[in-house]
Amino acid sequence: MGVLEAKPMTVAFDSRPCKETHGIGRYTRCLLQALRDMGPERGEIVEGHRPRRCDVFHAPWIDGALLRSPVPMVVTLHDLVPLKRRGEYLRTGVRFKLRYLAVQRAVRVIVPTATVAHDAISALQIPADRIEVISEAPAPTFAPRPAGEVAAVRDRFELPEQYLLWVGGMMTPDPRKRIAALARTERTMPLVLVGATTRWARELPDVTLTGAVSDDELAAIYTGAHALVFPSDEEGFGLPPIEALACGTPVAACEVPALREVLGDRVALTAVNDLAGLIRTAEALSRPAPEPPPWSWQDAAAATWDVYADAARAPARWRGAQSSRGRSLPSS
């Protein structure tokens, strides 16, 4: 056994996205807590984005990936939408260009689905043996809430008795989320949108906006919904559907590869180009909803520690700038 296996590792973990309100923030908070809950036997987690005196550095988002990491680097790549759809993501695509180069230099890359793994191999030329698929899970707080909690959030946010639900970030318009198109689609039930908002979202027609809510409030809002509608035409994973299922709420979603991979027949899938059909399907759903996939954040943390151990043993030639030599991003 090598020296690195004889003593616990020290892992520098970039915890900055914990403050984010969207899915990357949820991923970072849940994974970090699960890693800490595993105890000191595996190793020590030190929060920081400038790794020093540690064995491995983990950037759980692309913004934290380093072009020249002084130690073996692990990066979580949630999706490659800005690279795959450059015309719709011009501003973020430019911002991400150097980050994608940094991802190419990572010793190991964690992705949430085989769909994203395929994209990383084809778009970034990352060798398959450096990629690890580690699924995500609903946070423990997401479970069916009692009637009193559901009634309380209904009063607090002036929600209708029966409603369709969408959950996500609305700080900027995201073309793949298709929120505006969903709001314009004919329906018989009210539509409630949950998430932080800015002016453009407040101008959407015929919807109820709650703004940002706490996790406990969100669990109660999920529980009280008739169904979750998920109109995205591309996803790397899709946390809201599994959160909704964990709260006992059925889900109607567009059939995109990652959702089909993660959820299979647990949700009602409709054609991507048929939002009217998505609404009809959601309105026709009934309880009980299927259980979410049997995967927990404790499972994810254990698999992530294994990735750290592999990264710490990586050959020196895989590290830093040398690992991306001979590879470049596809031209636009």
Image (cartoon, rainbow, N blue to C red):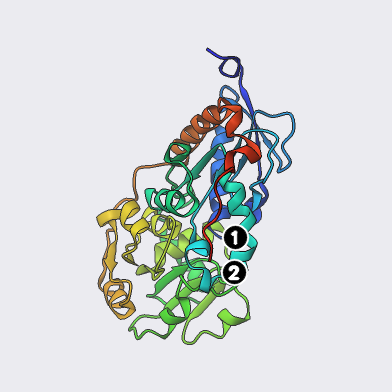
> In this image, 199 relative to 269: left or right?
right
Examine the rendered structure and indicate whether residue 191 appears above or below residue 194.
below
Q: Residue furthest top?
A: 1
Tell me the kind of residue under disc 2.
Ala
> How far from the left and from the top, in percent, is residue 126?
48, 45
Examine the rendered structure and indicate whether residue 185 appears above or below residue 271.
below
Mark on residue 196? 2
* Residue at the spot 43% in from the left edge and 58% down from the top edge: 238
Question: Is residue 145 visible in this depiction of the protein?
Answer: no
Q: Residue furthest front?
A: 326
Count residues near mark 2 (Cα–Cα under 10 Å), then give few for <14, some for 14-19, many for 20+: some
> In this image, 173 relative to 283: left or right?
right
Contact, mark 1 vs mark 2 (Cβ under 8 Å) = yes
* Residue at the spot 28% in from the left edge and 54% down from the top edge: 264
* Residue at the spot 52% in from the left edge and 62% down from the top edge: 83
> How far from the left and from the top, in percent, is residue 86?
52, 68
Mark on residue 273? none
Q: CA distance from mark 1 to mark 2?
A: 8 Å
What is the secondary structure assignment of the residue under circle 2? Answer: loop
Examine the rendered structure and indicate whether residue 211 appears above or below residue 258.
below
Q: Quadrant of residue 279?
A: bottom left
